[in-house]
Image (tube, rainbow, N blue to C red):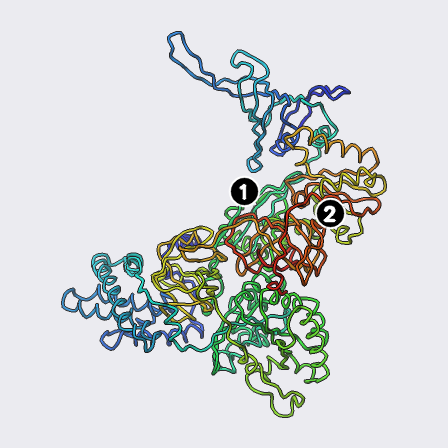
Amino acid sequence: MRLIKQNIERDGSGSVTLYPEEPEDMWHAYNLIRPNDLLRASALRRVTTESSTGSTASHRVQTTLSIRVTGIDFDPQAGQLHVAGRIAEENKYVKIGQYHTLDLELQRNFTLEKGEGWDSVALDVIREAIDPQKRADIAAVVMQEGLANICLITEHQTILRQRIESNIPRKRQGRSGDHDKGLTKFFETTLETLLRHVDLSAPKPILLASPGFTAASFQKYIIDTATSTGDKALLANKSNFLVVHSSSGHLHSLNEVLKSPEVLARLKDTKYARETRLMDDFFTLLRKDDGRAWYGPNEVSKAVDKSAVGRGGGILLISNSLFRSQSVSERRRWVSLVDRVNEEGGEVRILSSQHESGKRLEALGGIAAILTFPLEDLDEEEEAEDTEDTPNADMGNLQI
Amino acid sequence: MSRHRIKNVDLDEDDFYDSGEDYDDGDDGLTVEDREQLSRGTKQVRDVLGPDIAITDQEIQETLWHYYYDVGKSVTWILNQRASSQPKGSKKSKKETKATDTVATPTKKAEGPSPDDLVTAAQSGKGGNKASKPSTKQASTEKEKNEKSAVAPAVEVPKPKSKNINVLAEYEKSKRKNAANFVVIGHVDAGKSTLMGRLLLDLKVVDQRTIDRFRKEAERVGKSSFAFAWVLDQTSEERTRGVTIDIATNKFETEKTNFTILDAPGHRDFIPNMIAGASQADFAVLVVDASTGSFESGLKGQTKEHALLVRSMGVQRIIVAVNKLDTVGWSHERFQEIEQQASSFLTSAGFQPKNISFVPCSGLTGDNIAHRAPDGLVPWYEGPTLVDELDKSEPASRALEKPLRLTIGDIFRGGIQNPLSISGRLDAGHLQIGDPIVAMPSGETAYVKALDVDEEPAEWAVAGQNVVLHLSDIDPIHLRTGDVVCSPTSPIKNISTLTIKLLAFDHITPMHIDVHRGRLHTPGQITQLVATLDKSTGQVLKKKPKLVQPGSVARVVVQLANPVPLEAPSRIVLRSNGETVAAGLLE
């Protein structure tokens, strides 16, 4: 993303003009645009004209529209952002108050003016979005026998490109051939799909992760196939295939993959590698249960109130999905939390909800904190409001 | 040439009825195994065809080779072949009776002295007649499509008719032996597969020749001690790597009981497969490696995890086979040391001391497995051999009256007559040929065209039996391993939110997990820790805990990515990052 023009006043009012260059930029735009913002971008609109005789004719016109945003829809697979809203500025095709959905396009400027003013988090998103340093995306195939997830890991997102499921007959007495045949078929499908989504001839790392030997066999299959078909481009890049261990073929095993030494050696200091490490640190502390790691909105808010997330190791982990909240007051709450931690000298990490580490954080309620000093019983008074009556179930049948 | 071959492969994949055609042209010569199967098959085909059909051995063998030694298919093909080559009319009736014989024979063999026998023969005979007629016509008109026509009857057969057998009454009448499944568990390289290979040899399920052949082949790849394991480790990958990857099943019988072995993989990556096996087991055989240091490292590793898993899946009885005692000179001290450590660990895992027994043995030499060790070798042990110990198992009671439930363990092509077959163990209920079934979560209906119990054709099956169901009227796309087959009248529900009471083996926070139940293996997320509970009384100790400590009992809510067929009470295992983090009961 390129910053074309910025005029933001001290009080947070003002507008920013941005130029998206790649699909990833749509993700940033998605995190930036909120309901009630004013968005100005070029649009295609179908205009119906009625002649004096009453016959109608409709045609599409290219025009620039300003809308007051009411809803945002992001399609991570296609990298498209649809912003719905009502026209805020009249021109010769549209009237104020009419509805329009803008599809933000690559290589076309858009101008954004914040309805609630620019806050620190929004400015951070812009800063991150316009960071010109490009890092390589990597493709990963997380697989187990009969299941493969092909995904693309970019700086800010993990995009599941395709999921392949194939039935492989299990080994049976005297019919071991069926299994091998099924496995070969599965590899064939996976490779075909992989070729459709990823350019294997480009010198980019491709992670093959699986429990057991599936990934290694798949790597062998790819190289064998390339050899037999004489695919020189693929053969030249065969060292790009990294076989990594994962405990299952489901997508959430990706966090194990990103932690493995083979991957870290190549991808050190990427945002997702850092985030993964941070989440691990948090879980390690949580396991110790010494009152220094807390998660959940209320607990973390209380910890910040007690200035426990400050200078000297205090870290606030927060998922960017919280800032995408529809309600203005909700977003304000999280922004002020972030500001307070920053003021007190603590570290704030905004994790992408599209990454595995972000998803782990989401499971914890989207927010967690590592405190500088232990605090006990932050969750105490909540128990009163929990009126749900859990029946004293018969423990007899749970003989473990 | 290479291009040609690729084309072939494509065809092979697309063509559903492919086994009729020979794509094996690349194969050079026959292996010993092939020859053996060929000669056996030839004899069987001859038996079925009877003396009336004039055919050379070579022709039969050719056909068998085409059909990968499937006797049934070969016979059908030969008969069709005859039909097309012989003039129509005069011999037609004869041909048809032959076809009838073919279909009826297997049923007869299996059923034995059953009153239903005649009916079966007549009914299947009818099917056979119908089937053979169109194929005869087709074959005479279009010779090239011979293989296709052999398939056609299987597709054209109308919905299988139910005979409305009162299965439960039949089951009461039949005097079957007890049937028991046991799972063989233990740390990787404890010798599970080898022990079972030896057991099968000593009980004459596998003959010495096969073992000798395996030994020779194993020596060739430098793994001579793996010969016994190869009885169960059959895929090429398992053999080259020398580890069991998937559950292997095999059967043997003693005077009292029909046993099914479920040989589980020990490697930690394949624990999902081990869970699938353990979920079908009535009791477990834990194999521990007695050699110095191995037992200790196993206890930290999969010996412990496996024992906890089988216990949490409801297995009560465990036999500990202290293996490889020959490597420590049958030392009594070593045996006692292991016995003491293992029993204290197993009791803490929840096994009752009376349900734990220890057998010193050696899989490689075969002592104390089926036969006692020679006199003087193990003077300090007077107890039963492993097989005697197995025989002590009590038959488990089965949920026969409950609605039908079967977790699909495998989906495969059962042969040209049965393009779609599934296997598994009936968890509850019963079924018979002609029954409609519903596969969940897809909710598609299918009919049971035929079924095998313990690899013998049968007309009905009840809970606890290992069955293969040959299905009709369903597209294989609707079936996946781990799906549940149930009766249309009381289908299992698909759920995506589970409340589980669990025993934590590790720290539990809201996190991503894999949910395992038998072959079912699906990703999910713990969304809520509802409460920690008192272990013995079930009283709520703390609501909404932040963290569940290992060893404590808690109630949690799990959100699954996709709805799956599950119902209470099911035993569930939760795993995360390759570790078993909890086991629990669905509420």
Q: As shown in the figure, which amino acid type bears the numbered disc 2? A: Arg
Whether residue A380 is visible: yes
Left or right, B76 with reference to B389: left
Mark 1, residue position: A197
| Tag of residue A335 | none
Give the number of the mark in front: 1 or 2.
2
Q: Is the residue at mark 1 from the same chain as the one at mark 2?
A: yes
**In the orientation shown, which residue stands out farthest toward the left?**
B90
How crowded pointer 1 is (Cα within 10 Å; few <14, some 14-19, many 20+) is rated as: some
In this view, A77 is above or below B162: above
> Which residue is labeled 2 in the image?
A277
What's the residue at 71%, 50% (across, down)?
Answer: B545
Q: Quadrant of the N terminus of chain B?
A: bottom left
- What crowding class fits label 2: few (fewer than 14 Cα within 10 Å), some (14-19), or many (20 or more)? some
Disc 1 to disc 2, how far (Cα)?
28 Å
- Position of residue B221 relative to residue A318, above or below, is below
Secondary structure found at label 1: helix
Q: Looking at the picture, how far across and down is residue B372, in whole percent?
A: 58, 87
Q: Can you give x and y, in whole percent of width and height, for residue B139 in the image?
A: 23, 60
**Chain to which the residue tagged by mark 2 belongs:** A
Please identify the quarter of the rendering in which residue B110 is found.
bottom left
